[in-house]
Image (cartoon, grey):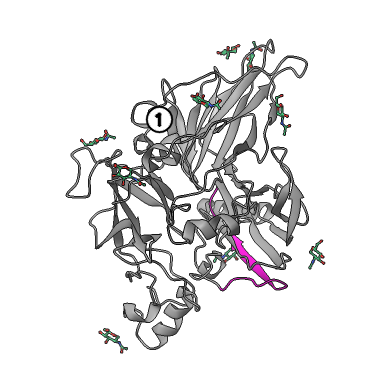
Amino acid sequence: MLSLSLFVTLIALTSVQAKVVHLNWNITWVKAAPDGFERRLIGINNEWPCPSIEVNMGDRMVVDVYNGLGDQPTGIHWHGFRQYMTATMDGALGATQCPILPGKSMRYEFNASTSGTYWYHAHQTGQYPDGLRGPFIVHDPSPPFQYDEEFTLTLSDYYHEEMQTLLQSYDASASATNPSGLEPLPDRTLINDAVNTTITVKPNTTYLIHLICIGNWPGHVIIFDDHELTVVEIDGVFIDPYTVTGKHIRLATGQRMSVLLHTKNDTSRNYAVWDSTDVNMMFFYENRSIPANFNNNATAWLVYDKDKPLPPAPIYTELDPGRDFVDDLIFVPADHQPILEPVDHRIVLDTDQAFVDNAGQMRVNGQTYIMPETPTLYTAISASRRNQTSDVSVYGQVNPFVVEYGQVIEVVINNHHGNLHPWHLHGHQFQVIQRTGVEGGYFNGYFANVSSTPVRRDTIMVQNHGHAVLRFRADNPDMFSPFP
Ligand SMILES: *[C@@H]1O[C@H](CO)[C@@H](O)[C@H](O)[C@H]1NC(C)=O
Ligand SMILES: *[C@@H]1O[C@H](CO)[C@@H](O)[C@H](O)[C@H]1NC(C)=O
Ligand SMILES: *[C@@H]1O[C@H](CO)[C@@H](O)[C@H](O)[C@H]1NC(C)=O
Ligand SMILES: *[C@@H]1O[C@H](CO)[C@@H](O)[C@H](O)[C@H]1NC(C)=O
Ligand SMILES: *[C@@H]1O[C@H](CO)[C@@H](O)[C@H](O)[C@H]1NC(C)=O
Ligand SMILES: *[C@@H]1O[C@H](CO)[C@@H](O)[C@H](O)[C@H]1NC(C)=O
Ligand SMILES: *[C@@H]1O[C@H](CO)[C@@H](O)[C@H](O)[C@H]1NC(C)=O
Ligand SMILES: *[C@@H]1O[C@H](CO)[C@@H](O)[C@H](O)[C@H]1NC(C)=O
Ligand SMILES: *[C@@H]1O[C@H](CO)[C@@H](O)[C@H](O)[C@H]1NC(C)=O
């Protein structure tokens, strides 16, 4: 009787708290000048930066998206959301839906079923660096740590030219004036889509800071001058609190991290927050020299007293990733989920860059990706009616791997390219079994020090000429697939 009444009470509480969050979005071009240079950016409801979404765990999201751009298709991905049984709402164009054409709309409807730090962004070529991205925070009613207040900081590299223009030379054949396949260099680094961002803080207060790398290309190191950080969440996964000492945290594109910061007990001065983008990625690994006046740093400030000066950021020279950055493999998920064993199915991805018609293209297992006209999920649904789901030839040139419901999948990513590449898995979090350093070589067996409770996240940086080994359980079918 006792347990029954408790159960009923819990249900009642949940249904009181959970609510429907209905957003109406008109995606439009907006003029803005975040760093003083005006250009058109993609905004929402005629505003840029795009709005931050904050909801409670269990809320139901209903987002009506109208494409008011006029000249480009669009679609929104909810990065890190599990989309359990709602794969058609994931927003991955060509994989889970067709693009939303100009003048058309689509309703996204899904549950904010897990708490943590997420973001949303356009999943149409080049559109999120053109502005269409924002934070998406899902609050937990009882997180395994305490804090007084919270705020979010987004980190990004930023470009004055529109991506469609920049991509033309990136994709074009190499020539004397155009080194094909070489990423365009960013013009600025932005914190909260701005330069000179100030954050007003109270003394003697514990802040939960949601950090989100919404950038296009390089990794970001963020340093709070003279304040200690304790990492408590990565990519929606609570971790055993990890206090950072003697090193700095780095976020790859798509990664998130929540940190606790306890402010000083006095308001005698303000402090710089410094974000620097990865010069190895942008220059040294690509044999490029740093142009004069190039500035890969951005500064924001923790303001204790608005009448006091904003001090410059401290100078750090020669940050060495291997020595100075926290290796995310040392984090331990708070639920101590054991390593997934045994592996039922191993997938090996050998990735490299090749020159096709003298134009640089990224490949997986010797193949480029060609976006299919029919989204892969829908091909799978119709193939299942003909018992052809496991026939990889029906999907087109998308490098398909078919797995069985409930299997433990191991993904080995060998990065044969001379630069770093972040990888993101939709609909699942993966355990990171191992990852080499830069130039660490390709998979040829497990390291001796594999953790029994590996770090779990949804986005990982794979180092140049190195590899990573990931595991996840294939437990997220779409609503049409047969499963036990
Ligand atoms: C979207 O915004 C544009 C620009 O303001 C406007 O012309 C259009 O009518 C809006 N469409 C909808 C469906 O709100
Ligand atoms: C940011 O601050 C610097 C230094 O005060 C100033 O020179 C610059 O104009 C500011 N930029 C913007 C876009 O406000
Ligand atoms: C989403 O949440 C609603 C309300 O709690 C529930 O009725 C529905 O079954 C959930 N959907 C999925 C796919 O879990
Ligand atoms: C800081 O806050 C704690 C808890 O709120 C309080 O006990 C303490 O006295 C405060 N210290 C100062 C110096 O204000
Ligand atoms: C602030 O004061 C509290 C106790 O009053 C102490 O525990 C804490 O270490 C102090 N914090 C700083 C940053 O000095
Ligand atoms: C940079 O130079 C090294 C050594 O010559 C070479 O192996 C590498 O492929 C070059 N990288 C690029 C992106 O050209
Ligand atoms: C950016 O920060 C790095 C590391 O502190 C420093 O070496 C470099 O000089 C800075 N660049 C500029 C333009 O301030
Ligand atoms: C479906 O195909 C598999 C192998 O491709 C076969 O083993 C199975 O019997 C088929 N099922 C039906 C219902 O035809
Ligand atoms: C595990 O071992 C490998 C190879 O010996 C080493 O590169 C890596 O840093 C180690 N990782 C940890 C987390 O100790």
The amino acid at mark 1 is: Phe
Q: Nearer the viewer, residue 187 or 291?
A: 291
- Is 108 magenta? The answer is yes
**Would you say residue 116 is visible in this rendering?**
no
- Please tell me which residue is depicted at 55% across the width and 20% down the height of the picture: 227
Identify the magenta region.
98-115
Q: Position of residue 258 (x, y in %)?
A: 53, 36
Q: Find residue 444 and report its horizontal and vertical position in percent.
A: 17, 50
Residue farthest toward the front in the current orientation of the protein: 176
User: Which residue is at a point 40% across and 83% down the rendered structure image?
Assistant: 384
* Residue 464 visible to an observer of this rendering: yes
Q: How many numbered discs?
A: 1
- Percent position of residue 85, x then y: 50, 68
The main secondary structure of the magenta stretch is loop
Pointer 1 local density, CA inside 10 Å: few below 14, some 14–19, many at least 20? some
Residue 348: % across, % down: 26, 59
Left or right: 240 as drawn, with respect to 310: left
Residue matched to label 1 = 325
Residue nearest the observer in this picture, 417 or 182: 182
Quadrant (top left/top right/bottom left/bottom right) for the C terminus: bottom left
Magenta-drawn stretch contains 141: no
Residue 370: quarter of image: bottom left
